[in-house]
Image (cartoon, rainbow, N blue to C red):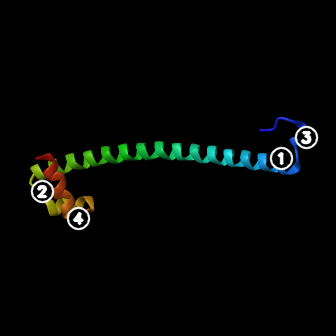
Amino acid sequence: MITDLSEITPDKLDEIADEMDEQHFRQLLTDQVERLGHEYQVAVARATNLEAKCKLRTFRLYRLGFKPAAIAKLFGVERNVITRWLRDWR
């Protein structure tokens, strides 16, 4: 902290500018990370909702007589995914 005008030197001014740049950079980075965190939470919520819809449709198809392999083909996923979804509903 500068307490006297005689302490103001070009080196001191450069040091203060560097500190301000670093603080600005830290704030920008923090803001970006907070926005990304929010985007991530929204994406996880959407994915969870989508998976729940897929599980429900899987269960309905299974009850209509579709085999897990046929359901997997419709969704474009591996059969073990359908087996897991069906297990979740039982």
Comparing labels 4 and 1, the label whose residue is closer to the camera: 1
* N-term-proximal mark, 4 vs 1: 1
| Residue 24 at x, y percent in the picture | 68, 45
* N-term-proximal mark, 2 vs 3: 3
Q: Quadrant of the N terminus?
A: top right
Which residue carries the number 3 mark?
6
Find the residue positioned furthest to the top. 3
From the viewer's side, name the closer residue of 90 and 11. 11
Mark 3, secondary structure of its residue: helix
Comparing labels 4 and 3, the label whose residue is closer to the camera: 3
Look at label 1 and name its amino acid. Answer: Leu
Q: Are marks 1 and 2 in contact (CB under 8 Å)?
A: no
Give the number of the disc on residue 78: 4
Give the number of the disc on residue 13: 1
Q: Is residue 1 above or below residue 78?
A: above
Residue 61 visible in the current orientation: no
Which residue carries the number 2 mark?
66
Mark 1, secondary structure of its residue: helix
Mark 2, secondary structure of its residue: loop
- Position of residue 43 in the picture relative to residue 21 (left or right): left
Give the residue drawn at x 89%, y 37%: 5
From the viewer's side, name the closer residue of 19 and 54. 19
**What is the distance, in whole Å, between disc 2 and disc 3 at their CAs?**
85 Å
- Position of residue 76 in the picture relative to residue 83 (left or right): right
Picture quadrant where residue 70 is located: bottom left
* N-term-proximal mark, 4 vs 2: 2
| Residue 19 at x, y percent in the picture | 72, 47
**What is the distance, in whole Å, between disc 4 and disc 3 at their CAs?**
74 Å
Comparing labels 2 and 3, the label whose residue is closer to the camera: 3
Look at label 3 and name its amino acid. Answer: Ser
* N-term-proximal mark, 4 vs 3: 3
Task: Report crowding for label 3: few under 14, some 14 to 19, many 20 or more residues within 10 A (C-alpha).
Answer: few
